[in-house]
Image (cartoon, rainbow, N blue to C red):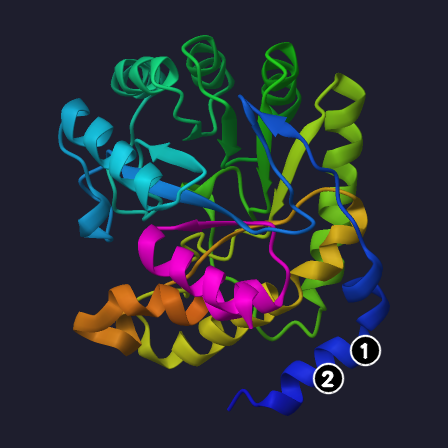
Amino acid sequence: MLTLADICEVYNKHQDDYNNTQVEEFTIGNKKFNFNSQTSILGVINLSTDSWYKPTICYTPEQAICRGKVLTLQGADVIDIGTEATAKTAARVDELEQTSQLLPILKTFSQEGVLTSVETYYPEVARECLKAGANIINFLGTEHNEEMYQAVADFDAAIIICYIEGRHPRDVGEFDFNSGRDMIDVLYDYFGKEIEIATKIGVRKIFIDPAVGIGYANFYYQYKNISNRMRYQIDTLLNAFRLRKLGFPVFNQIPSALEIFGEEFRSSQVFSAVFAALGKNDMVRTHEVAKVKALLETMSWL
């Protein structure tokens, strides 16, 4: 059981990092982000009908545009759009299809001043989306990283660099919960190297993402691993502030627990968001913008 003593232990061991670390703050589109004083929210639009989080699926461009406007009114700072679900059984979406689905939506959002993020691991998709007005590339891959960083630098855009144990989310195997490694140290080393490459190319607006929501084979649908997965995800959220020493804001997906919450799975993101707030995550990706926004505001008042 996770206890108050466990949370205190994290703070007591790393309190200097918690109290004294500051990260880069920058402008995306026409909005200045104050990461050192306020958690930002990334709302989700899924264009893939294979997504397991059914309430966020949009079946037409019109639905996606409508949902983006609603999420913005609910408090989302950026709208994240994905064309391909990460589950291994989900249909693959090639570069041409991703581009054709994304561009009409991005152009509308750009005209209306809605900030957007695009999930892709294809540099050419990223470049076309940035031309159409996308503001952030959510880079869900490890291949072709320099090409991706160059595209982002050319448009003075922002990028979310994810930690993935594979070429992309469809290429991951099982996550080793029992290796004895401190994952924050592993993540710190990985992001340190990627930041060095990206900044040399010219990228200035970077988020680092431990990617706790990536679909490793033993993360989902295996009851015996639920406690391992949730403990890892919560530990990562709570310890996210340790990654801020790299100088850039930390981004995390708010994980869900369908296996535990059942029909109330939408409430699980509020539960997880508590730990994201305690761990000083600078931007969170959530399917439940209104609920998480209320949670973050409540915690900021206490």
- Residue 295 lies in the magenta stretch: yes
Label 2 Cα crowd, 10 Å radius (few <14 / some 14-19 / many 20+): few
Q: Identify the residue shown where x is 76% and y is 60%.
A: 185
- Residue 127 lies in the magenta stretch: no
Q: Which of the 4 quarters of the picture holds residue 68?
A: top left
Q: What is the quadrant of the C terminus in the image?
A: bottom right
| Residue 143 in sight here | no
**Circle 1 — which element?**
helix
Number of callouts in the render?
2
Task: Assess whether mark 1 and mark 2 are in contact (beta carbons under 8 angstroms).
Answer: yes
**Main SS, magenta residues:** helix
216 in relation to 176, above or below? above
Which stretch is magenta? 273-302
On the image, the x and y values in percent for residue 126 come to 47, 19
Q: Which of the 4 quarters of the picture holds residue 148?
A: top right
Check disc 2 and report the residue beneath it: 9
Q: Give the residue type that dot 2 points to.
A: Glu
Nearer to me, 185 or 204: 204
**Circle 2 — which element?**
helix
273 in relation to 66, above or below? below
Check disc 1 and report the residue beneath it: 13
Q: Identify the residue shown where x is 34% and y is 18%.
A: 112
| Residue 78 in sight here | yes
Nearer to me, 224 or 272: 272
